[in-house]
């Protein structure tokens, strides 16, 4: 699998060139509005003095870090603001490979393709741990696969693409396995606001020096284009304190710092957005999940109803999730999803549909008609 | 020299804690206003639809790249929009080390410390080529030092910290030397709008497959905190086309993409800002240079009047540019500059003063009084 060329670009391109109306269920870009405070923040920023247009601290605006630290229950010194979860995951994965013995990065199958692309680009050995039919990662499977060759384990909850949400016991087991093999658990929690079960647990709750949690406001505030994310590292005065020190230096020498208007706007949104914003988005998404899953029932499809996130994986009889079938679905139904094979061998018969369109209803109907 | 901890932070911190009024001539952050169109762009962005808040193309907004390409006289495909010149230089230097044989990065002495920090972080062998007394890099000096061990040569014109502007002949010679040794010339041209001589030449004008030019709007639009920069790579269908391909992948896997509101605002500013904006800033800076250099004359200091950029290096008799003396100048005069030793051995007796304060006048007077 070629992880280096983001495969969803191929699908988006095909959809754009299609000679018909296409409902885009490919990308992970929310279609709903950001919090009002975010836009207010941008407007106010436009009136600030020249000094406010200059470099923010390399680690991020102090008040933004303080808000993040309070939310995550950690000391502010552990928070590094990054250029989205992308950079946070990059820094965490590189850091784990440098800090711990072994050359292996363990991922799940199916996997968010960027993790695998990044691990390949870093010349790591990449191992895949199969997940259960319901999309959850069984700690025993991970334990079986992990070894002293393992330097980094990446988990993602709520999960893209499976929709699984790992509970506290599972997360504690993942952390314990990382500690046993002197490896780093990188826990990508970017969908934490999209937990429909109340089961979500942050890996930070385990209080381990072998955990970096990554996150961003890209999904929770519907601003994937702003690039404001963060990583929470183990304390600098602890046994793995070098991780933070190296990440700060790498961030400084790669990016210098993040974009200040974006950080300023996110800070304003954090100060002014109540829990009802996030609850409204969750309600909108559970409606879409209901609609879409009902149609999948009508189409006779197998699927996993997501516990979190905004993706649904589905499988149609005698219609495996190849690129060819994705293209055919675009041409025949005007619904664009992602081929399961883009996420790993175990889901090559499946499709992933992102519920980031107001036309989930229409898409569901088209698929049900096609497969009926 | 420890390049990994940005040394100017130490000075800024000392200045902030000083028990008196301090004029900051340390940082490279402009103190003048950005173009009006930039702020208008931000305000308009705040009213856009949800779709405009999502991922821009990883290589940057298409129209922004087109504007950059037109200004630089290159095909748009060669332009990669980055998180400031910082990321552009990072991608270029890593790419050169990967693509070309040899492990050496050649820099000048004095040097902008980030180049050396980055080269050290990348485990490259770092070589320094001394510059002339007037701050210019003599091609013969570079030729003498370059070898087949050289993979990357970094030049910066207009230069930070020396204020030198390399002419067309010098730039052509640098390019030729890079080609002779199968190395990459990384030409950081971020101060190109601050050329007071008309001598500035872009390395791109040489039309070589061994050149990456880097730049940003950080200085020219007085927005160091926005992080909108770019690199122009050799054409992808040429002999060194892999450079661009690898840089795109690395950029994607590190940052995914840059911040969209910042790119949008810069694009608006490019569309609406006339040459008078840049001319006004240059006029402001040449006034400051006159004022400051006059005071240095009064103080009996040696200095180089900059041909470009906004830094002045000065040397006071029996008062070398150490951190200790920088701290003493802060305490005794309330003027904060950078110690020359931060830029390399050859300028350890010098100070660098950044003319990014409206109080250049007052600072000059204080220094003249102290040293008189």
Image: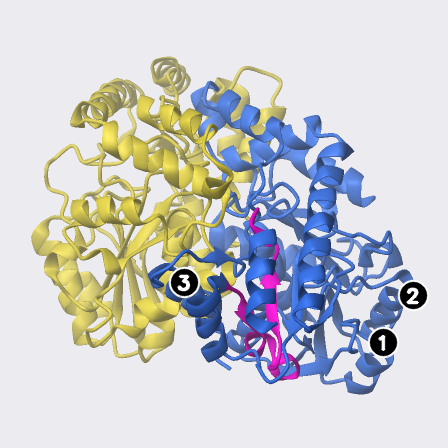
Chain colours: A yellow, B blue
Q: As drawn, is B371 to the left or to the right of A319?
A: right
- A194 w.r.t. A35: above or below: below
Question: Residue B273 location, x and y as percent?
Answer: 70, 30
Secondary element at tag 1: helix
Separation of disc 1 and disc 3 at Cα?
Answer: 39 Å
Question: Residue A211 location, x and y as percent?
Answer: 22, 63
Chain at tag 2: B
- B126 w.r.t. B334: above or below: below
> Upstream in the sequence, badge 1 or badge 3?
3
- Figure quadrant of the C terminus of chain A: top left
Name the residue beneath numbered marker 3. B15
Chain at tag 1: B
Question: Residue A311 location, x and y as percent?
Answer: 32, 34
Identified at 76% across, 39% down, the residue is B279
Evaluate whether residue A211 shows in this view: yes
Tell which tag, 2 or 3, sits nearer the viewer: 3
Tell which tag, 1 or 3, sits nearer the viewer: 3
Name the residue beneath numbered marker 1. B139
Chain at tag 3: B
Q: Is B258 in the magenta?
A: no
Of A361 and A243, which appears nearest the observer?
A: A243
Name the residue beneath numbered marker 2. B169
């Amino acid at each position: 699998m070629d992880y280096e060329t983001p495969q969803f670009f191929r699908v988006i391109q095909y959809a754009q060139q299609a000679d018909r109306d296409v409902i885009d269920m490919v990308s992970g870009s929310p279609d709903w509005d950001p919090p009002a405070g975010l836009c207010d923040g941008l407007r106010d920023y436009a009136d600030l003095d020249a000094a406010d247009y200059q470099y923010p601290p390399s680690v991020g605006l102090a008040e933004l870090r303080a808000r993040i630290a309070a939310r995550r229950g950690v000391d502010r010194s552990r928070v590094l603001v990054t250029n989205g979860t992308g950079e946070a995951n990059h820094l965490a994965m590189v850091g784990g490979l440098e800090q711990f013995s072994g050359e292996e990065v363990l991922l799940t199958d199916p996997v968010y393709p960027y993790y695998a692309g990044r691990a390949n680009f870093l010349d790591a050995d990449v191992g895949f741990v199969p997940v259960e039919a319901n999309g959850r990662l069984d700690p025993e499977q991970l334990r079986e696969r992990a070894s002293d060759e393992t330097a980094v384990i990446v988990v993602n909850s709520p999960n893209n693409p499976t929709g699984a949400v790992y509970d506290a016991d599972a997360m504690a087991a993942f952390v314990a396995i990382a500690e046993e093999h002197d490896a780093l658990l990188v826990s990508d929690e970017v969908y934490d606001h999209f937990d429909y079960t109340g089961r979500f647990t942050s890996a930070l709750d385990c209080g381990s020096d072998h955990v970096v949690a990554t996150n961003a406001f890209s999904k929770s505030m519907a601003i994937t284009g702003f690039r404001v994310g963060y990583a929470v590292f183990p304390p600098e005065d602890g046994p793995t304190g070098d991780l933070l020190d190296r990440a700060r230096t790498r961030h400084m020498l790669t990016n210098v710092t993040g974009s200040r208007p974006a950080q300023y706007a996110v800070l304003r949104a954090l100060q002014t957005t109540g829990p009802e914003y996030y609850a409204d988005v969750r309600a909108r998404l559970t409606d879409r999940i209901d609609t879409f899953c009902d149609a999948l029932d009508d189409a006779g499809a197998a699927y996993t109803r997501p516990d979190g996130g905004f993706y649904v994986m589905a499988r149609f009889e005698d219609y495996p999730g190849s690129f060819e079938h994705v293209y055919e679905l675009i041409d025949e139904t005007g619904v664009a999803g992602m081929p399961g094979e883009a996420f790993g061998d175990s889901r090559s018969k499946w499709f992933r549909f992102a519920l980031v369109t107001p036309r989930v209803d229409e898409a569901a109907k088209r698929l049900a008609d096609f497969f009926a």
